[in-house]
DNA sequence: CAGTGGTCTAGACCACTGA
DNA sequence: CAGTGGTCTAGACCACTGA
């Protein structure tokens, strides 16, 4: 059984929907008809259709039947790989150059810091991501000491990169990323080794583990040397 | 049957994994044990575990068992809503201000244009997206006439916005988005009404319908007035 | 109220792979 | 080679809802 039958049924209809042979609103055969056509039990047909439902390709209504879903094309999958691996994949050497770190209480009144701290202190880090020795991004990071207690003996955190260290020690389960463009301040331009007021891509990310805040990070990428790429295919979702 | 049993089993383990009670690498009970614990058939247990597998929360290996997955947190869902609706949701008025349009052959040697054209002509559009009458983004767009034949009588395409018109007439099934930061050229700055060499967020998108290229669009957003936001939750995928 | 999907059962045979 | 998951069967009862 190289290709399970339910998988074949699923991909049959996926292909027909993506090619447009089955257009939004079109009705699919009922499960009984599919059982006869593929010569299988109802559970097998149902498994295939459940996968299409989870992928958002079809809608199912009792008594009415199964229909090709109207596309709700408004979300894409954004690849946010680990920066060190991403740089190495481009064939460049990666290095993290620490600028400094310290432990401090959250700034009173700064709601985001207070929430991140969760009653404890914040561990603050600043450093540069270098590709082939050249600054690619300036990183400012806050870590909740309450959520990551062993941040204290952070001997190794700056040896690799804070992001990689955290992902290994305290993987997050939820994240929010904000992307914007801005001009580097004179100080930021100096650290990145770029002309003053150059356009930079600013990536801010907040991560959670369950309901606990883990970290806030702000990465400032040199505008002309970094792009973010996002892809969307209707086959995302349950397919992988 | 308000809450199906397979759904209860799934959410039981999802909660334990997200809370950290079950850590990456931990082993889950085997299907036989779960059948006894929940007093149900193996297919019911299997359905619950299949959903967790599709969501990427667990790994399953024959003979070895079922384990909490090591997080591979490197993709996020990026909301790319329709610009007019997005602006209206912010309580602002939206308007598209056409700068010009024409039909022309693809530039020879420009591989991306040739592929987009697919043997036909290109319909080229330029215009401004205005929020409350103020320029928010400068849009340059190419549309494949072969893929969208009725672009000829484009009386209404500039009445709403080219993006909304296309989504309604030729919904895409696949897309790639590239996000970068750059300084506006003097001409772009003039059109957007911003100081020269201001940082702008540049969003480029290529879309497909099946294997046909549909459109290429480049939107230049005024840096300090637009952010892109992406969210990731481990429960994406098969859960919804 | 009849057609359709949602869920579940109690089995079965097999493929894979690690103890 | 035995334990585990992958797939499938041939039924069943029920909930929902639109003809």
Image (cartoon, coloured by chain):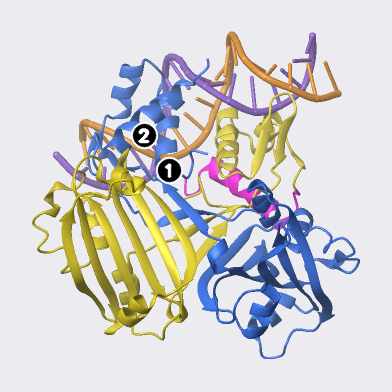
Chain colours: A blue, B yellow, C orange, D purple
Mark 2 — on which chain does it sit?
A
Residue under the image location 53 percent in, 60 percent down: A227
A71 or A135: which is nearer to us? A135
In the rendered image, residue A234 lying in the magenta stretch gets the answer no
Residue under the image location 25 percent in, 45 percent down: B117
User: Element under label 2?
Assistant: helix
Position of A76 with respect to B29 (left or right) is left
Q: Which residue is mark 1?
A: A55
Check if mark 2's residue and mark 1's residue have beta carbons within 8 Å.
yes
Q: Quadrant of residue B142?
A: bottom left
A228 or B32: which is nearer to us? A228
Q: Which residues are magenta?
A: B1-23
Q: Which residue is mark 2?
A: A14
Q: Quadrant of residue A63?
A: top left
Q: Earlier in the sequence, mark 2 or mark 1?
A: 2
In the rendered image, residue B22 lying in the magenta stretch gets the answer yes
**Pointer 2 local density, CA inside 10 Å: few below 14, some 14–19, many at least 20:** many
Residue under the image location 80 percent in, 69 percent down: A98
Which secondary structure dominates the residues rendered in magenta? helix
Mark 1 — on which chain does it sit?
A
In the rendered image, the residue lying farthest to the bottom is A109
Q: Are marks 2 and 1 on the same chain?
A: yes
């Amino acid at each position: 059984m190289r290709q399970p039958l339910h998988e074949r049924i699923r991909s049959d209809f996926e292909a027909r929907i993506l090619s447009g042979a089955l257009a939004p609103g079109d009705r699919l055969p009922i499960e009984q008809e599919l059982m006869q056509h593929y010569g299988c039990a109802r559970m097998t047909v149902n498994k295939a259709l459940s996968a299409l439902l989870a992928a958002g390709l079809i809608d199912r209504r009792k008594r009415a039947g199964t229909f090709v879903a109207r596309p709700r094309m408004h979300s894409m999958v954004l690849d946010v790989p680990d920066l060190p691996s991403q740089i190495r994949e481009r064939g460049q050497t990666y290095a993290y150059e620490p600028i400094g770190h310290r432990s401090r209480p959250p700034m009173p009144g700064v709601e985001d810091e207070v929430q991140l701290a969760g009653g404890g202190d914040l561990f603050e880090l600043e450093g540069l991501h270098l590709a082939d020795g050249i600054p690619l991004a300036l990183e400012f990071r806050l870590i909740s000491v309450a959520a990551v207690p062993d941040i204290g003996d952070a001997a190794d955190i700056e040896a690799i990169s804070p992001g990689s260290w955290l992902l290994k020690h305290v993987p997050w389960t939820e994240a929010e990323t904000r992307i914007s463009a801005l001009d580097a301040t004179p100080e930021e331009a100096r650290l990145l080794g770029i002309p003053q007021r150059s356009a930079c891509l600013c990536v801010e990310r907040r991560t959670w583990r369950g309901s606990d805040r883990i970290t806030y990070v702000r990465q400032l990428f040199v505008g002309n040397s970094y792009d973010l790429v996002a892809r969307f295919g209707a086959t995302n979702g349950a397919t992988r």
